[in-house]
Image (spheres, helix red, strand yellow):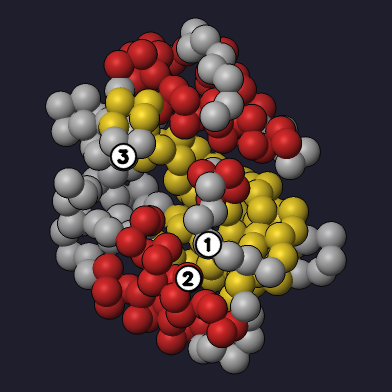
Amino acid sequence: MTEPLTPGRDPALMLEQTLAAWGGRSDLWIFGYASLIWRPDFEFAEQRAARVQGWHRALKMWSRVNRGTPECPGLVFALLSGGSCQGVAFRVRRIDAGDVLSALWLREMPSGVYDPRWLHCRTPQGPIKALAFTLSRRSPSFTGELTPAQYSQVFMQSRGRYGTTHDYAHQTLHSLRAQGIRDRALQRLLDLAGAPAAPPK
């Protein structure tokens, strides 16, 4: 079972457009802000701490397969406009980039829900432009504002083919800390929702 296609979205066409925008003339950079940090599932030649301006990490995207079900949706992170976000940028060799993007599309874009964007990233080694998966607030998968009680209910009840939203959120928090990144908003969310900490897997 996969997430249903987002209306008006063709993942294959979006991949074609992304490949065209990349151009194939240099190595490919990919910006990870959540599960890509702790489970990239692709070969990379280098990774760097990176920050993007104008976007922030938020647990505000419905998941009806991976971390929940249609009857009891879970949540996953998205990159929303506004603020800034610290994450990890991965460099993929040019020769491997086509295969890596095709595999990444199967994981991140089976429903076409994200808006792939090339974002300017600041890294200790200098600026780069990296591919990131962002979400529009007009998307049917955007949750809008949720209360602590709603988050707590999701943490307690929602489970999908890859496990619970609760474990996913804690794994992301743990991985961010391992990278030296403090996400106070995520920590407050987990604290306010009263979700007990789970050991990283």
- Above or below residue 98? Residue 173 is above
- Above or below residue 201? Residue 36 is below
In the drawing, does residue 6 fall left or right of residue 43? left
Look at mark 2 in the image and give the residue it sits on.
100
Residue type, mark 3 in image: Asn
Q: Secondary structure at mark 3?
A: loop
Look at mark 3 in the image and give the residue it sits on.
66
As measured in the structure, the alpha-carbon distance from the residue carrying label 1 to the one carrying label 3 is 19 Å
Q: Are marks 2 and 3 in contact (CB under 8 Å)?
A: no
As measured in the structure, the alpha-carbon distance from the residue carrying label 2 to the one carrying label 1 is 6 Å
Q: Position of residue 1 (x, y in %)?
A: 17, 46
- Work out whether residue 118 or residue 173 is closer to the camera in this orientation and state it: 173
Which quadrant: the C terminus?
top right
Q: Are marks 2 and 1 in contact (CB under 8 Å)?
A: yes
Mark 1 residue crowding within 10 angstroms, few (<14) / some (14–19) / many (20+): some
Q: Position of residue 61 (x, y in %)?
A: 36, 40
In the drawing, does residue 158 fall left or right of residue 152? left
Kindly indicate the quadrant of the structure image that contains residue 14: bottom left
As measured in the structure, the alpha-carbon distance from the residue carrying label 2 to the one carrying label 3 is 21 Å
Q: Position of residue 16 (x, y in %)?
A: 35, 81
Residue 120 in view: no
Residue 117 in view: yes
Q: Secondary structure at mark 2?
A: helix
N-terminal-most mark, 2 or 3: 3
N-terminal-most mark, 2 or 1: 1
Residue type, mark 1 in image: Phe
Mark 2 residue crowding within 10 angstroms, few (<14) / some (14–19) / many (20+): some
Residue type, mark 2 in image: Val
Kindly indicate the quadrant of the structure image that contains residue 102: bottom left
Kindly indicate the quadrant of the structure image that contains residue 67: top left
Look at mark 1 in the image and give the residue it sits on.
42
